[in-house]
Image (cartoon, coloured by chain):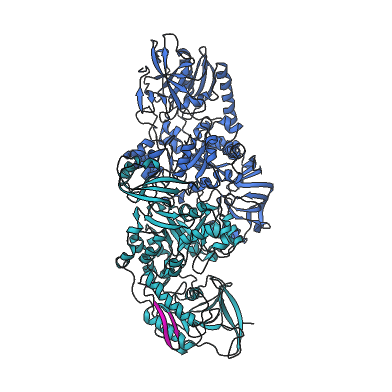
Chain colours: A blue, B cyan
């Protein structure tokens, strides 16, 4: 198999003669966009042009079409035109929106292509969740590509997960037109150490794309990871690490998510010369930041204005570089034969978007928001309740009350890595402030004992926060000042079938429902935002100092990111990949 | 099918664990190259490094391998290291050398990869000729890729050819690991005008590469050509044409051949930013220029020294840009997991090559020249005499001797296009000097009447030149001051089974035999050069002013390059794609 059968890759043969006739000028074109200036991401030039469109494709570009007969003429009003933006790696689940709501929120921001990895829902419900994303990709106007989640569960044996996702299942789905390759291979030790089952996956997808995930990986280990054919990384944290990855031929996907923000660090690596190897991605971006800052458009704007990257270079990263990297030969350029995925801008530097075109249709005319429910229904989403836990009681959270030294996870604001503290408990209080109870509670029907831990850095003074979003196996995560409120919060999560809860004084203070897999809302982006605002009011009232406590809490469960994490099976020391007890060895 | 099964694309799974262990430092590497400086064609930096090699592949790059245990250590002596050079498009037949002699001549010059189109031999002997090139590609150390000759014959109906090459034959060979795609689609009118049989070929190869050929194509026609998926052009003649092709997303393959030289014109388009879309090729380069100037190494040197392109940009064109363009994911970089195809240089600016490594072997140690005959034998070359013409006599060349105005082909020195003159003949001489007889004589066993014409611009004062190299159908081409010597020259070509002949005063003055398909020599590059030198002495003595009369003569037969050409069937007006009589309409 090859990439040729994938979405957007070819003009159907039956259609080609008509498109050629339109290009030649022998037949009327469908749309002519006039009075525009193209930012050319190959040459860096900006010049007046005309774009002739036939069906979903650009059939011609250039002033030679100025007087071409057309079914419709769009006056660009002097707008600048760039190719549509490509998000090189993201988990749509992190937006809490369905792919259709996500599309309605991000397509108007210029993100015409999203290369997603639905590994959150796949951890919860396996191939059934993954296949729903494939069905969504058949319906969205946005070019939704769905990489094959490579590490479900993220760390076998360290957590209870809703399902796994086997190579046999992957093989059956690999041929789908939305699958461009293997999603982030987080098990980099498995690749480097030639674990057979990991290399089986890499080999199976070597004719497609092989996405990487290798935070802080440098030196010999990085060489080995690349040797196996892994082609990119979006987890680069330091400048030196980024330089080494570029030098060694790795695609540098620069991430600016809601928590993990690498743009400032990595922007100095972006130049005219290095630009073809640099891409952009959001990875995990919540509806709040999508609404207030933006999506890929925001990253471009930051590159230009904050990091002083030249305009033509910044736009190239989000267009040509990404398309080339993933072998998407009909995307990433405003050129004949490419898909008519365009961004019309009033101002290039400010990335002020006037309108967006997707496959020859103006997004302003698509009324995407009106059609979300209809599309969602058509996609046949998996609606069963995935929170299969019976309600818990205080005795299910048997935190120790004896004197001693305990292992404590310390949160680092705006990072997904944590610190490993050892704090002394005198029977009443810890020797450090802000150390709270935390539990990770299995929710896949086994009613296993909870994983227990201590956490520092939330600022919470009263009550509890609970969530069914906890990477990547999405058991129920809860943090609290007392066990009673923790039970209230967890039991509300169970009652709702998933979501976020703030509890205090024995009662629920605020909540957001996430009924699809305990991860996604059925509501609109606006409604989700409003829900999150009520959560924010509640948790701030209770003392929380983190901007995004639920997102940060979600990553406290992820045992593939250093340093100390809590799964439903207990505390994981990620530097050693082993469980450690709550009580510390001093 | 995809590119994954192609040569150099992957490390065999059975070998991968060993290579990973070498990369990790857990196993001894095969070769360690120390005391070197890498020119990084991604970042543009130059820095000291160490290269660790396992089998045919680079397993690690970086100072972290400085002390790695190795079976062999090579001291680079401070040399600069770049990736091996890639020739983006060429016809090896134009070198008159077999692929093995070509390899011996060009691999030491740094050309580790050659993407060839054997359409000369395929015109002569169809799939049998093509398949020989595939067999050669299985034997050469040089990465020889063989694009599928798309237009055999070049212009159906306009010339007699030895064979055609059908889509069905192509389909059977497409899966060969050396086939990267469809070779130069010279029938651009067929693509643009949606000729079904042409689009069938384009469609069949759309999952591989689609090479273009579109001299002077601009505007709407260029848009249409690109729309169909054609991805590059090596026939760009003017600066404006090159700019437009770049702007419209076409890969710009800059050619510097023996006759067609486009480097000076197109170099101004090469910049750091545009570099990923610019490649280099030789197309047609004879053994003389390969020996005296060089190959791709010469083009790099010219880019840097004559055209002031920055060093890192010049090398990128010949390495990374070409590899990316053709989807060769293990070539074009000095990086982990890439093939150990390297050039070691004493000086980057002068491109002074110290040694070359191909797949982990030093070319200086391969003794390629000693093994040419052995490899040639192994490849089972097609050795039958392809010159199936019975000897001609003067009455077979019935040039008109009546007064009138005649169509005359004017040669343009160092160009493959010609001018169309109309010259008046008074029964004794033409109104312009240097107008000579020319004939194109069918040689595939039909003994058809010769195509007759007049040519201006050789300077020949006496005798005749004949050749069995005449693009693309390779009938016998002869130019002379008198018919008697023309017969002598042609009959010597027939006797030899192909080659070049200079005749004068009723006798052969000098000749070079080309027994394989009338195109290729069985001799060494040195011997071929010596043969050409004797030809040069002879034709200069007879007044020829062209540097390369045989190469220019070869293109006088090619009816897909403007303006006026002569096939065995007669004069072709290439602006109208129709035959015109010898006598001109005034």
Q: Is residue A310 left or right of residue B451?
A: right
Above or below for B508 versus A156: below
Q: Is residue B13 magenta?
A: no
Q: Is residue B271 above or below residue B62?
A: below
> In the picture, residue B129 is in which quadrant?
bottom left
In the orientation shown, which residue stands out farthest toward the right?
A: A77
Instruction: Return the x and y of residue B164 as percentages of the image width and height.
Output: 43, 70
User: Quick check: A6 above or below B295?
Assistant: above
Which quadrant, please, contains the C terminus of chain B?
Answer: bottom right
Above or below, A580 against B534 in this view is above
Do we see residue A145 in this rendering? Answer: yes
Q: Nearer the viewer, residue A16 or A425?
A: A425
Q: Is residue B513 magenta?
A: yes
Rendered residue at 55%/58% (across/down)? B226
Residue A142 appearing in the image: no
Q: Report which quarter residue B120 is drawn in.
A: bottom left
User: Is A214 or A308 nearer to us in this picture?
Assistant: A308
Residue closer to the observer: A580 or A163:
A580
Image: magenta residue range: B501-522
How far from the left and from the top, in percent, is residue A235?
A: 47, 36
Which of the two residues, B259 or B497, is positioned nearer the viewer here?
Answer: B259
- Count all numbered tags in the image, as a single digit: 0
Q: Is residue A583 left or right of residue A455?
A: left
Residue B487 % position (x, y): 44, 86
Residue B538: percent from the left, percent from the top? Answer: 45, 81
- Left or right of residue A52: residue A274: left
């Amino acid at each position: 198999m090859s990439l040729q059968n994938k979405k957007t890759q070819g003009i159907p043969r039956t259609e080609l003669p008509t498109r050629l006739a339109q290009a030649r000028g022998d037949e009327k074109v469908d749309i002519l966009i006039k009075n525009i200036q193209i930012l050319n991401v190959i040459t860096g030039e900006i010049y007046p042009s005309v774009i002739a469109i036939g069906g979903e494709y650009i059939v011609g570009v250039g002033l030679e079409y100025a007087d071409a007969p057309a079914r419709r003429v769009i006056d660009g009003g002097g707008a600048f035109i760039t190719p549509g933006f490509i998000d090189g790696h993201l988990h749509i689940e992190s937006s809490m929106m369905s792919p259709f709501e996500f599309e309605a929120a991000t397509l108007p921001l210029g993100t015409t292509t999203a290369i997603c990895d639905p590994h959150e829902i796949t951890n919860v419900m396996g191939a059934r969740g993954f296949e729903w994303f494939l069905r969504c990709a058949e319906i969205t106007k946005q070019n939704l590509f769905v990489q094959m989640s490579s590490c479900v569960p993220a760390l076998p044996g360290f957590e209870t997960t809703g399902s796994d996702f086997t190579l046999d299942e992957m093989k059956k789905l690999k041929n789908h037109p939305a699958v461009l390759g293997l999603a982030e291979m987080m098990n980099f030790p498995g690749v480097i150490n030639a674990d057979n089952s990991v290399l089986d996956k890499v080999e199976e997808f070597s004719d497609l794309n092989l996405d990487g995930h290798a935070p802080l990986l440098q030196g010999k280990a990085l060489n080995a990871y690349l040797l196996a054919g892994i082609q990119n990384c979006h987890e680069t944290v330091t400048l030196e690490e980024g330089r080494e990855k570029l030098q060694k031929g790795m695609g540098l996907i620069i991430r600016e998510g809601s928590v993990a923000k690498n743009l400032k660090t990595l922007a100095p690596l972006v130049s005219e010369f290095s630009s073809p190897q640099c891409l952009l991605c959001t990875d995990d971006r919540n509806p709040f930041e999508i609404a207030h800052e933006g999506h890929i458009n925001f990253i471009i704007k930051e590159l230009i204005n904050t990091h002083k990257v030249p305009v033509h270079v910044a736009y190239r990263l989000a267009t040509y570089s990404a398309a080339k990297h993933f072998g998407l030969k009909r995307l990433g350029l405003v050129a004949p034969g490419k898909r008519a995925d365009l961004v019309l801008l009033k101002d290039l530097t400010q990335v002020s978007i006037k309108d967006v075109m997707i496959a020859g249709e103006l997004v302003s005319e698509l009324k995407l928001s009106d059609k979300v429910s209809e599309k969602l229904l058509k996609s046949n989403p998996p609606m069963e309740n995935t929170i299969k836990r019976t309600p818990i009681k205080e005795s299910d959270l048997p935190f120790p009350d004896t004197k001693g030294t305990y292992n404590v996870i310390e949160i680092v604001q705006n990072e997904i890595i944590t610190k490993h503290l050892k704090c002394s408990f005198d029977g009443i209080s810890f020797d450090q402030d802000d150390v709270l109870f935390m539990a990770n509670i299995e929710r896949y029907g086994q009613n296993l004992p909870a994983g227990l831990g201590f956490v520092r850095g939330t600022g919470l003074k009263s009550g509890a926060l609970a969530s069914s979003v906890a990477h990547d196996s999405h058991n129920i995560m809860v943090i609290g000042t007392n066990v009673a409120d923790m039970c209230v919060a967890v039991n509300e999560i169970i009652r709702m079938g998933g979501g976020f809860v703030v509890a205090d004084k024995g009662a629920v203070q605020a909540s957001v429902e996430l009924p699809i897999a305990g991860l996604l809302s059925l509501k609109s982006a606006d409604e989700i935002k409003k829900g999150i605002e009520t959560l924010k009011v509640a948790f701030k009232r209770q003392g929380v100092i983190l901007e995004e406590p639920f997102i940060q809490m979600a990553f406290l469960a992820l045992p593939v990111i250093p340093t100390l994490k809590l799964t439903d099976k207990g505390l994981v020391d990620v530097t050693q990949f082993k469980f450690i007890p709550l009580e510390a060895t001093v």
